[in-house]
Image (cartoon, helix red, strand yellow):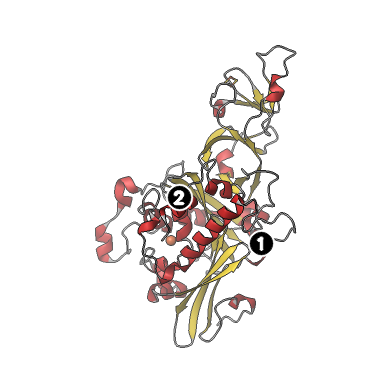
């Protein structure tokens, strides 16, 4: 559990909050590339409780600035991209993508007022199907060394899912491997013969070991297979709101046998405000192009074009009790894991009251995550860099990010088993 004060610290991320100051030290996704398809016309976006406008400049590069015009607060997402910036359509003020005011057509010709107006603006980069921004002070740190940000676009599939709850609840679900044995339990012909899936369903009490690292920590979930063999799965928590794990197959298993270790999946939980977040779902294949149609079918949640799933709290996630009685799924909410996770985390409350919890053995990852976040908040308050931000040495904290599923001999080590691979 956390005290009420600690819970406030780790869940509030708006401007001026300690948690918000910490989150702003890291690059964050602000939209999918596909949201700026076509001309890349301006769209309103909300992130970390700030209302912003995102658009492509005349060269096609993404640009991000405050939503409301500094003159008299008109919405700039209705504006025009022209003359090297974004022009407000109320009185024609023009803003460069770095926030400089370039023109004030109604002012006297000799006025220098424009040079004294500076609009909010944040740098952006685009990679792996995602547009990322840095909203903190000073020069941005290097982009995180995630493989999908360095690979050709066709190696990844990216989408997002609206969650009507605080970001930390979704964040915590990713490093809680035990829930997979229950929440995501389902009968499907495709999974019936999947060895790893059956191990997860059979051993519902995995041994969970945490290994802290320069980027956050690795969670090892170890399950019994038979007298000689265990299965170990490694999930990474990457500061402050991202996880990397084995996840969805990258190629349809009906077409090509599943290779669990040919790529990874990321869940990046980005606050819209304190009671809503976007869960960015990014599936990546290391060695070649991904089967995008298959991944879209697996990852999408039958939502509408605004990434809002059809199953939600207003229709009780379409829970089907007959389905549960038949045993087709454990929770009666269809076959998509995204829907299951959305239900589990939203139903904890808009902001979960962690002072009421009774944490257990399998919550080791949750406990470690919260401690690392609180330490990062304290570091920023103390004028230091938080965990994983490395500006000085150039070292890549993610150099040893390991996403792995393996069957291992009973007597083998858990922590660091991947350093000397001996799968059985
Ligand atoms: S409100 Fe934007 S130019 Fe006047
Ligand atoms: Fe889950």
Q: Is residue 323 left or right of residue 380?
A: left
Q: Which residue is at a point 65% across and 54% down the rendered structure image?
A: 385
> Is residue 160 placed above or below 285 in the rendered structure?
above
Nearer the observer, 396 or 17: 17
Q: Residue at label 2?
A: 8
Nearer the observer, 244 or 194: 244
Residue 168 percent across, percent down from the top left: 47, 54
Image mark count: 2
Residue 26 percent across, percent down from the top left: 61, 50
What secondary structure is found at the residue carrying circle 1?
helix
Q: Which residue is at a point 58% across and 26% down the rendered structure image?
A: 69
Residue 373 percent across, percent down from the top left: 53, 57
Nearer the observer, 270 or 9: 9
Q: Residue at label 1?
A: 397
Q: Mark 2: few, some, or many residues within 10 Å (few <14, many ≥20)?
A: some
Residue 18 percent across, percent down from the top left: 54, 47
Q: Mark 1: few, some, or many residues within 10 Å (few <14, many ≥20)?
A: some
Q: Quadrant of the C terminus?
A: bottom right
Q: Quadrant of the N terminus?
A: bottom left
Residue projecting furthest to the top: 108
Q: Which residue is at a point 51% across and 75% down the rendered structure image?
A: 232
């Amino acid at each position: 559990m956390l005290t009420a004060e600690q819970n406030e610290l780790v869940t509030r991320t708006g401007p001026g909050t300690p948690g918000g100051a910490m989150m702003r030290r890291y690059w964050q996704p602000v939209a999918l590339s596909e949201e700026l398809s076509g001309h890349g016309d301006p769209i309103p976006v909300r992130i970390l409780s700030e209302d912003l406008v995102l658009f492509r400049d005349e060269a096609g590069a993404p640009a991000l600035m405050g939503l409301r015009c500094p003159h008299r607060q008109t919405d700039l997402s209705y504006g025009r991209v022209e003359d090297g910036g974004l022009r407000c359509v109320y009185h024609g003020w023009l803003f460069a993508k770095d926030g400089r005011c370039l023109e004030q057509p109604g002012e006297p010709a000799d006025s220098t007022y424009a040079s004294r107006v500076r609009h909010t603006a944040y740098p952006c980069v685009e990679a792996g199907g995602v547009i990322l921004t840095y909203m903190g002070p000073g020069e941005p740190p290097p982009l995180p060394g995630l493989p999908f940000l360095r690979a050709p676009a066709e190696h990844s599939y990216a989408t997002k899912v609206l969650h009507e709850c605080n970001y930390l609840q979704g964040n915590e679900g990713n490093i809680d491997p035990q829930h997979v044995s229950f929440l995501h339990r389902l009968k499907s012909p495709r999974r019936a013969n999947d060895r790893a899936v059956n191990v997860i369903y059979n051993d519902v009490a995995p041994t969970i070991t945490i290994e802290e690292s320069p980027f956050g920590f690795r969670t090892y979930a170890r399950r019994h297979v038979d007298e000689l063999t265990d299965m170990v799965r490694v999930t990474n928590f990457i500061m402050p709101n991202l996880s990397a794990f084995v996840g969805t197959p990258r190629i349809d298993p009906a077409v090509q046998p599943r290779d669990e270790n040919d790529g990874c999946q990321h869940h990046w939980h980005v606050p819209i405000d304190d009671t809503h977040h976007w869960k960015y779902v990014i599936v990546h294949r290391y060695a070649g192009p991904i089967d995008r149609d298959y991944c879209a079918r697996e990852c999408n949640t039958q939502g509408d074009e605004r990434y809002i799933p059809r199953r939600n709290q207003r229709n009780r996630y379409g829970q089907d009790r007959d389905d549960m009685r038949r045993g087709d799924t454990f929770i009666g909410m269809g076959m998509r894991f995204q829907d299951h996770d959305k239900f589990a985390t939203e139903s904890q409350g808009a902001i979960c009251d962690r002072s009421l919890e009774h944490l257990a053995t399998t919550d080791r990852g949750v406990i470690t995550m919260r401690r690392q976040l609180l330490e990062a908040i304290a570091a920023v308050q103390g004028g230091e860099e938080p965990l994983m931000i490395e500006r000085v040495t150039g070292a890549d904290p993610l150099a040893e990010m390991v996403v792995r599923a393996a069957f291992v001999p009973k007597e083998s080590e858990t922590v660091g088993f991947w350093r000397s691979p001996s799968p059985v």
